[in-house]
């Protein structure tokens, strides 16, 4: 089935093939789990176990002991053989605990708990979410609880959930919002209580709202104001700047505060952490692409190598041209089948050489298409030229701060210049104080 992506600020349209995917259930257990100690944007977590020790399912492997880090738990029982370095879905390398599967499970296969969170205090909810290692995967993966605490400290009490994908090719958030909406809404409600939110915004881009009615929502969200908002179905309407603009257009009060924005993956993680009393041990991911034997949606143990997942989905139907993690528009191409699933893995696309051919980058032809399509109205090529020349002017820095890294500029560039990647790398480098 062909789907079309239309841009906010241009007549450009691109097409991609998306098949109807079944939720197949749990993936096979990995015989070897590679559990990264850094599954978020921030500092790596600090190991609390040693090589050679036996670990239980759900046991704390690494503690988020510094601001910006998050707890990491053992997804499977077994022997922690060693700490090794593995490729990560964001294109970096990171330290990981190698666990060889053995022993019995403490969580999987047992009757699910059903903790009544409605009467629990805000501080206790925050403690549980932190203890279970929940991160927010709306944009870059960040620990959820520090963001909630900071918002409470600043007096920001607005929560919004985007019920569709930022990158439409990922499909996962849209599918979860459709198939598991009740769970998503309950997870959102308990996050709203932990934040002590005064208002909650449910943002969808469907033709109509198919969820709970106003009475049910009022009961679930404990009489907080709940707004159902329709977002236009144009890319990149799901990014933070676009969401904030939408909220301000609906409620002028949103202009004076920075809302917390989450996605269905985050809401489900919060639900499982609080209601089911489970750390973040699994991720539901979309596995698809023309070179894949059988596209599916699987619930996968964190630390499972992507090669195991591809093999479970029928292996390679044809020789893969490229393997892309977390979306064709903004994702990362990976080349190692030992790369593990992390807390921020949402999709794996196995592309063939026809749909994702090799290409050569050419010099800019000054067509202006990147400027025309940019949703935040910066000049991407001018910024990249400044980066290449090392001219970090105030205008360049403001442009980098404004950039959403949505990839619109690179998608339409006839010279195939990876504009958004160059800007993203520059922002990361300059944020760390590297002026090269």
Image (cartoon, grey):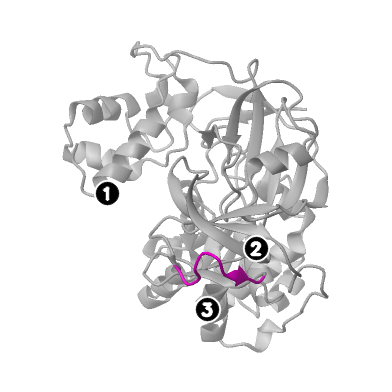
The answer to whether residue 251 shows anywhere in this view is no
The answer to whether residue 294 shows anywhere in this view is yes
Disc 2 and disc 3: Cα gap in Å? 22 Å
- Taking depth in this image into account, of 167 and 358 the one nearest to the observer is 358
Q: Give the residue pinned by disc 3.
A: 126
Q: Which image quadrant for residue 400?
A: top left
Q: Going from the N terminus, do you reach mark 2 or mark 3 first?
A: 2
From the viewer's perspective, is the residue at label 1 or at label 2 nearer?
2
Name the residue: 43% across, 43% down.
92
Q: Residues within 10 Å of mark 2 (few under 14, many from 20)?
A: many
Disc 1 and disc 2: Cα gap in Å? 33 Å
Disc 1 and disc 3: Cα gap in Å? 29 Å
Name the residue: 62% across, 47% down.
346
The secondary structure that dominates the magenta segment is loop
The image position of residue 320, as x and y in percent, is: 65, 24
Name the residue: 31% across, 42% down.
427
Q: Is residue 284 left or right of residue 20?
A: left
Q: Element type at marker 1?
A: helix
The image position of residue 71, as x and y in percent, is: 50, 69
> Is 92 contained in the magenta span?
no
> Is 48 contained in the magenta span?
yes
Q: Which mark is residue 334?
A: none
Residue range corresponding to the magenta coloring: 47-56
Name the residue: 65% across, 52% down.
32
Q: Which mark is residue 75?
A: 2
The image position of residue 216, as x and y in percent, is: 76, 73
From the viewer's perspective, is the residue at label 2 or at label 3 nearer?
2
- Taking depth in this image into account, of 293 and 2 the one nearest to the observer is 293
Quadrant location of the C terminus? top left
Q: Give the residue pinned by disc 1.
A: 431
């Amino acid at each position: 089935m062909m789907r079309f992506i239309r841009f906010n600020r241009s007549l450009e349209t691109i097409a991609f093939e998306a098949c109807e995917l079944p939720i197949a259930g749990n993936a096979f257990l990995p015989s070897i789990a590679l559990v990264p100690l850094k599954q978020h944007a921030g500092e790596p977590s600090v190991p609390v176990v040693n090589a050679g020790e036996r670990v239980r399912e759900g046991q704390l492997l690494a503690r988020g002991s510094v601001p910006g880090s998050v707890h990491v738990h053992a997804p499977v029982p077994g022997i922690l053989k060693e700490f090794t370095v593995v490729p990560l879905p964001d294109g970096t390398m990171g330290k990981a605990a190698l666990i060889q599967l053995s022993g019995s499970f403490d969580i999987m296969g047992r009757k699910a708990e059903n903790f009544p969170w409605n009467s629990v205090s805000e501080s206790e909810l925050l403690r549980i979410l932190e203890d279970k290692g929940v991160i927010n995967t709306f944009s870059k993966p960040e620990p959820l609880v520090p963001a909630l605490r900071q918002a409470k400290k600043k007096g920001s009490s607005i929560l919004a959930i985007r019920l569709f994908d930022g990158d439409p090719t990922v499909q996962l958030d849209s599918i979860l919002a459709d198939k598991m909406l009740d769970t998503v809404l309950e997870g959102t409600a308990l996050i709203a209580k932990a934040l002590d939110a005064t208002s909650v915004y449910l943002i969808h881009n469907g033709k109509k709202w198919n969820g709970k009615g106003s009475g049910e929502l009022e009961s679930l969200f404990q009489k907080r104001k709940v707004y159902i908002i329709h977002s236009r179905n144009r890319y990149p309407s799901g990014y933070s700047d676009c969401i904030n603009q939408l909220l301000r257009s609906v409620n002028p009060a949103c202009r004076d505060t920075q809302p917390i924005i989450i996605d269905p993956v985050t809401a489900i993680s919060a639900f499982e952490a609080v209601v089911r009393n489970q750390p973040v041990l699994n991720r539901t991911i979309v596995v698809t692409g023309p070179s894949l034997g059988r596209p599916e949606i699987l619930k996968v143990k964190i630390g499972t190598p992507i090669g195991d997942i591809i093999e479970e989905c029928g292996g390679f139907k044809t020789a893969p041209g490229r393997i892309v993690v977390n979306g064709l528009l903004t994702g990362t191409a990976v080349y190692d089948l030992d790369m593990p699933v992390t807390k921020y893995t949402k999709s794996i696309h196995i592309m063939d050489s026809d749909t994702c051919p090799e290409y050569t980058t050419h010099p800019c032809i000054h067509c202006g298409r990147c400027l025309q399509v940019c949703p935040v109205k910066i000049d991407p090529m001018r910024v990249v030229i400044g980066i290449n020349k090392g001219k970090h002017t105030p205008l360049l820095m403001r442009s980098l701060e404004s950039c959403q890294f949505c990839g619109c500029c690179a998608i339409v560039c006839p010279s195939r210049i990876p504009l958004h990647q160059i800007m993203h790398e520059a922002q990361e480098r300059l944020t760390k104080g590297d002026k090269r």
